[in-house]
């Protein structure tokens, strides 16, 4: 038996990427990199404990929302850096601001861990753990469930990150 609520409370995703830890770290934390894959929303980090995090809405996102009869804010995600150990570990709080369904939900905790793959030189394992207690709408969206309306969630983001780092192209190209 699977407890769906528990499964959504802590979500863990792993992907193996043929790239150095430094390239993966940059792709996650540098807006010049992170705007080039997945939802293409540039994310900005102050990579010190207590530093800020935010992601900005793109013009395409704003146009899509407007066509759907609603508006999204300029800042679509925000949070705070809790730990920063470049290029191996980043822990942050994370809150979605662009969807009314997530209004009032608490900050969640997001952890990125980058490890050298023991089985293959030149390959790293990226593990993303998203702790979502008290945030069921956010949990459904980042899980990429079909009824969330938010796209493919973390699995889609990490798949496109891998494609981008290994080929230089994203899903849209």
Image (cartoon, rainbow, N blue to C red):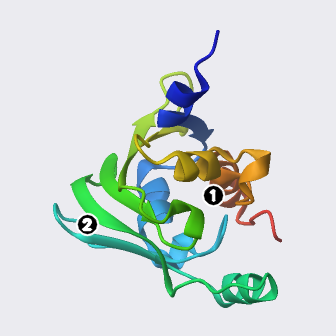
Q: Is residue 1 left or right of residue 53?
A: right
Residue at 51%, 87% (x, y): give it.
74
Quarter of the image with the C terminus is bottom right
* 166 up-or-down from 32: above or below: above
Residue at 25%, 66% (x, y): give it.
47
Quarter of the image with the N terminus is top right
Q: Which mark is residue 47?
A: 2
- Which secondary structure, mark 1? helix
Q: Is residue 53 in view? A: yes
Neighbour tally class for label 2: few under 14, some 14-19, many 20 plus, Cα within 10 Å:
some
Q: CA distance from mark 2 to mark 1?
A: 22 Å
Q: Is residue 44 in view? A: no
Q: Residue furthest top?
A: 1
Q: Is residue 123 left or right of residue 48?
A: right
* 115 up-or-down from 167: above or below: above
* 71 up-or-down from 155: above or below: below
Horizontal and vertical percent position of residue 79:
33, 65
N-terminal label among 2 and 1: 2
- Residues 19 and 11: in front is 11
Neighbour tally class for label 1: few under 14, some 14-19, many 20 plus, Cα within 10 Å:
some
Horizontal and vertical percent position of residue 116:
44, 34
Q: Residue furthest left?
A: 49
Can you tell which quarter of the image residue 115 is in?
Answer: top left
Q: In this figure, which residue is indicated by the disc labeled 1?
A: 165
Residue at 53%, 72% (x, y): give it.
33
Can you tell which quarter of the image residue 37 is in?
Answer: bottom right
- Residues 57 and 5: in front is 5
* 136 up-or-down from 24: above or below: above
């Amino acid at each position: 038996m699977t407890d769906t609520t528990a499964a959504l409370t802590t979500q863990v995703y792993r992907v193996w990427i043929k790239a150095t830890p430094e390239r993966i770290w940059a792709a996650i934390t540098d807006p010049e990199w992170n705007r080039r894959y997945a939802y293409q929303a540039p994310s900005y980090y102050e990579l010190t404990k207590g530093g800020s995090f935010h992601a900005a809405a793109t013009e395409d996102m704003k146009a899509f929302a407007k066509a759907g009869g609603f508006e999204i804010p300029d800042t679509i995600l925000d949070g705070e850096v809790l730990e920063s150990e470049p290029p191996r570990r980043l822990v942050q709080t994370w809150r979605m601001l662009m969807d009314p369904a997530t209004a009032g939900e608490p900050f969640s905790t997001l952890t990125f861990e980058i490890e050298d793959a023991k089985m293959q030189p030149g390959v790293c394992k990226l593990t993303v753990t998203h702790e979502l207690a008290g945030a069921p709408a956010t949990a459904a969206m980042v899980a990429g469930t079909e009824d969330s309306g938010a796209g493919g969630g973390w699995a889609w983001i990490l798949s496109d990150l891998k494609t981008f780092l290994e080929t230089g192209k994203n899903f849209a190209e």
